[in-house]
Image (spheres, grey):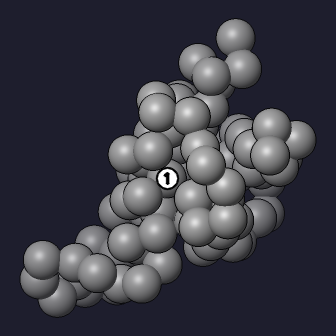
């Protein structure tokens, strides 16, 4: 599981640094980890939000721009949590 989390972390950092990576694939990978493994407590919340994002479980309808912004914010948060987890 740690190897998979580290791969997700690297993808998130690369995306935030401008590399051409599909952001939904990063969030989907994180959601998959949440669904497949017993994750560390400090990561449960952000990974569960990745799961909700992939299921499009939002409180209200989102425009395309809002959807993109929400995904980018989630990737930033995911990167931060995983960065702390690996330090």
Q: Could you tell me which residue is drawn at 62 percent across and 22 percent down?
A: 85
Crowd around label 1: few <14 · some 14–19 · many ≥20 (10 Å) = many
Q: Position of residue 62 (x, y in %)?
A: 22, 83
Q: Position of residue 39 (x, y in %)?
A: 59, 44
Give the vertical position of 43 relative to 57 (above or below): above
The residue lying furthest to the front in this view is 38
Give the vertical position of 81 relative to 77 (above or below): above
Q: Position of residue 51 (x, y in %)?
A: 46, 69
Of 43 and 38, the residue lying toward us = 38
Do we see residue 78 in this rendering? yes
Do we see residue 76 in this rendering? no
Q: Could you tell me which residue is drawn at 80 percent across and 37 percent down?
A: 2
Q: Is residue 52 left or right of residue 47?
A: left
Of 21 and 38, the residue lying toward us = 38
> Residue 86 is drawn in which quadrant?
top right
User: Label 1 belongs to which residue?
Assistant: 47
């Amino acid at each position: 599981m740690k190897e998979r989390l580290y791969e997700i972390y690297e993808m998130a950092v690369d995306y935030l640094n401008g590399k051409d990576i599909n952001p939904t694939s990063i969030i989907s990978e994180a959601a998959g980890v949440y669904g497949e493994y017993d994750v560390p407590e400090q990561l449960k919340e952000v990974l569960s939000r990745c799961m909700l994002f992939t299921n499009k479980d939002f409180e209200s309808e989102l425009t395309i721009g809002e959807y993109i912004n929400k995904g980018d914010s989630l990737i930033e948060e995911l990167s931060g949590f995983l960065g702390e987890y690996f330090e």
